[in-house]
Image: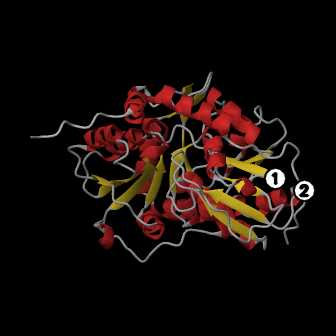
Amino acid sequence: MTPPAPQAGPPAALHRLWRRLPAGPRRRALQAAATWLAPRPDRVPPPARAGIAVAGELLRASGLGEAARLMLAGLQALGVPTWSLPLASLPALGRTAPPPDLPDGAPLLLHANAPVLPLAARALPRTALRGRRVIGYWAWELPTLPPAWRGGGAFVHEVWTLSEFCRAALDPLLPGRVRAVPPPLAAAPPAPSALDRAAFGLPDDALVVVAAFSLASSFERKNPLAAIAAHRAAFGTRPDRLLVLKVTEPGAFPEDFRRLREAAAGADNIRIEARSLPPADHHALLRCADVVMSLHRSEGLGLVPAEAMCMARPVLATGWSGNMEYMDAHCAALVSYRLVPARDPRRVFEAPGAHWAEPDIADAARWLQRLADAPALRAELGARGRIAVLARLGLAPLRAAVASLGLVAP
């Protein structure tokens, strides 16, 4: 006789009920619970001493993870003692143990945006928060903030951020306590592997344009359909004009990936590279490009274009938002745009009254044609871009931020 199937207990039933709720209300409920339960730092910021501990997605290929790694490299280049606290992917966090030699009083630089910061605080031991200055490192890509960010200010004494573009958006939340400290790319420039075009299956005799983006960073904001449209308008189906779409995390957002495949369908000169590549191989792919294109609607900084410029690759990009702090018309091919209300189907990159850029596809196509026909112009833009990004994303802002804490940076 077959025994009766076990009945789900109250926890399982509650879990199923929880999963039936829409993602937005679930996210807000989780944030509210974490905000209420999470430990807070000392009300008065303690004096800084000993060095700086850096916490974040140090082991993950994400924008904030790369910013955390660059901050560690920059602090070490300045001779500042550092300690690292890797966090699991946000917001799905597990408990993190502090380094056994983390001294009292060392400030904590916590790379976690305001909405998930209470969750990050819950994942950290109290010894990592109490008795030390807590600095949030935040990234936001619109000129105004959504309501979900308002509670994060209670968990930090001050905020560092990617750019002046971000600082202007964040400052109303913590007036006078937000500082632009761009990731010091010059302290840890890309180190591409030895992979060449043949290794990626790319022909030597074609003009190769690369657009690299993560689907986790908002399909609408990264705007890869504009890259496809511009390439089609510029080159049609010419086999010697190749667009490579380097996509990260396609499996996490299958509907967005389907839209991308449909937009590229029928074009033999458009390829999708969806393999997970280690950083060195990713940088090698950028180095293989004749042009790196970013027709984004908004960027807090734009790390991929900055990395490409660091390797002397000419960059074609929307001429608006945080990337304009290391780009200008002298060192990049800037695409014209118009500002439109920000609309994100995922409801992440939206805020009351927020706008972002709609790049001009025809202007981008003209730039692509011009760059394709002018190798000397590509070389000139690449050389100028490298000089600009190394000068503008150097150690000076981080050195000033460290000094503002009362720590001496040589």
> Which residue lies at the image location 85% right of the left edge and 72% below the top edge?
410
Report x, y in % for residue 23. Answer: 45, 30
Along the viewing direction, whichever of 217 and 13 lies nearer the viewer: 13
Which of the two discs, 2 and 1, labels the residue nearer the N terminus? 2
> Which residue lies at the image location 30% right of the left edge and 65% below the top edge?
202
Snapshot quadrant of residue 374: bottom left
Residue indicated by mark 2: 47
Residue type beneath disc 2: Pro
Q: Is residue 228 above or below residue 67?
A: above
Report x, y in % for residue 191. Answer: 53, 72
Whether label 2 touches label 1, CB < 8 Å: yes
Q: Residue furthest top?
A: 353
Q: Is residue 45 above or below residue 143?
A: below
Neighbour tally class for label 2: few under 14, some 14-19, many 20 plus, Cα within 10 Å: some
Along the viewing direction, whichever of 56 and 264 lies nearer the viewer: 56
In the rendering, which numbered label is found on residue 255?
none
Whether residue 168 is visible, yes or no, is yes
Q: Is residue 289 above or below residue 230?
A: below
Neighbour tally class for label 1: few under 14, some 14-19, many 20 plus, Cα within 10 Å: many
Whether residue 384 is visible, yes or no, is no
Along the viewing direction, whichever of 132 and 391 lies nearer the viewer: 132
Q: Residue furthest left?
A: 1
Drawn side of residue 116 relative to residue 225, left or right = right
Residue type beneath disc 1: Arg
Report x, y in % for residue 388. Answer: 66, 60
3D distance between C-alphas at marks 2 and 1? 7 Å
Residue indicated by mark 1: 133
Drawn side of residue 40 relative to residue 27, left or right = right
Drawn side of residue 260 relative to residue 124, left or right = left
Q: Is residue 251 above or below residue 184?
A: above
> Which residue lies at the image location 50% right of the left edge and 41% below the top edge?
296
Q: Residue furthest front?
A: 1
